[in-house]
Image (tube, rainbow, N blue to C red):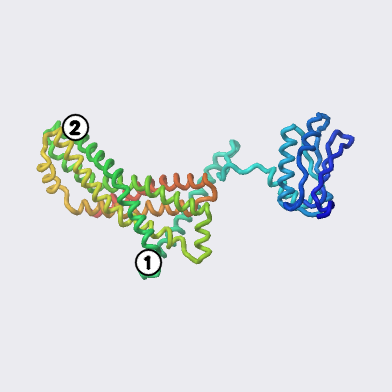
Amino acid sequence: MSRTDTAQLTLSHDNENALVADLGGCWRLESSLPGLNELSQRLQTGAVKRVVFRGKGISAWDSTLLAFLVKAAETCHQAGLSLDFRDFPDGVERLLKLTQTPPQTSSAPTKTESDHLLVRLGTITINIHRNWLNGLEFAGELSSSLLKLVRGKVHFRRKDFLLLLEGAGAQALPIVTLISVLVGMILAFVGAVQLRQFGAGLFVADLVGLGMAREMAAMMTAVIIAGRTGAAFAAQLGTMQVNEEIDALRTFGISPMEFLVLPRMLALIVMMPLLTIYSAFLGVLGGGIVSALMLGIGLQAYFLRIQESVGLDHFLIGVAKAAVFGVVVAMAGCMRGMQCGRSAQAVGQATTAAVVSAIVWIVVCDAIITLLCQTFGI
């Protein structure tokens, strides 16, 4: 390689106490590159106020040149000197601007104190409207996938579906067991404190049985699954969005809605009613323990009273609610995960939004179903 093709660094001083660094030759990996020792020694003299890098004599370059300039700029910044880059190729100047631009630490819009109240209300309204439209679009795509499933035109891996069933069902049994027993005991304790004043302690069985069968079993199970499985769905899909795995599926012609969302939806639709039945039984059992300890009501009399006062229709209402709640939790988790941004912070935001959305819609759906049941006398 000739001398003119080798990367060159020439240092000189001008009349303004500026150190001029002229770069020339070929700045590539295969070239012998000059070090920064001479530049550092010149900066330590104390007579330099400014450093000017000129690249007019550069014949060829690659990332080696940029790495050298970044390192030299760091050396100058440590010495407290100002920098000036002149006569560099356009590509080098653009890359230098990128290295000098600080990264965005947050994808969320910044809030300014000067925003008027009406502006903030308008922004909130627009965001609500946009989220509503996105939810309707997601629900439409999911409904289309369900119709394809009925017609046998949807294919997803059976192994993934079985793993989702295990994660949403069997692995959730410990926390569902704990919460259900405690809720049943709390209902029985509150009822026992009030009812034994009137000598009607046996009716604690009615309170616990109806409460667990119609409301608390489905509600508490749904909240547990929203915080556990729904958040996991959002985090999984959000991470896949960050890693561009969902884009890769679309590139291969695979629908993410059918391959990722639909199995999760079916897993919760199947497991939520089963977990609710399990939760209702444990809640009734927890109520029986409190009744036996506080009221002296035997478990046999307690369960006979529940059998008389709580019919199968009450349990079916709870199971139907559980199926609806399963759809709500799966939609919230998967939708937030699919709408996730491209950063780690966005994954956390999507997970939080999934849990909040799921709990809010669980309460709304429960209120609507309860109102319909009261209206039709069910």
Callout 2, which amino acid? Val
Which residue has dot 2 on it?
193
- Residue 368 is situated, as x and y percent measured from the top left of the image, at 32, 51
Of labels 1 and 2, the one closer to you: 1
Residue 129 visible in image:
no
**In terms of depth relative to the viewer, which is nearer, 200 or 221?**
221
Left or right: 204 in relation to 323: left
Q: Secondary structure at mark 2?
A: helix
Residue 65 visible in image:
yes
Callout 1, which amino acid? Leu
Left or right: 95 in relation to 127: right
For label 1, count other residues whose C-alpha is less than 10 Å away and answer few (under 14), some (14-19) or many (20+): some
For the point 24% across and 51% down, the residue is 277
- Residue 336 is situated, as x and y percent measured from the top left of the image, at 46, 51
Residue 247 drawn above or below residue 340 = below
For the point 29% across and 44% down, the residue is 174
- Residue 203 is situated, as x and y percent measured from the top left of the image, at 14, 40
Which residue has dot 1 on it?
149
Left or right: 366 in relation to 66: left
**In terms of depth relative to the viewer, which is nearer, 5 or 47?**
5
Position of the N terminus by quadrant: bottom right
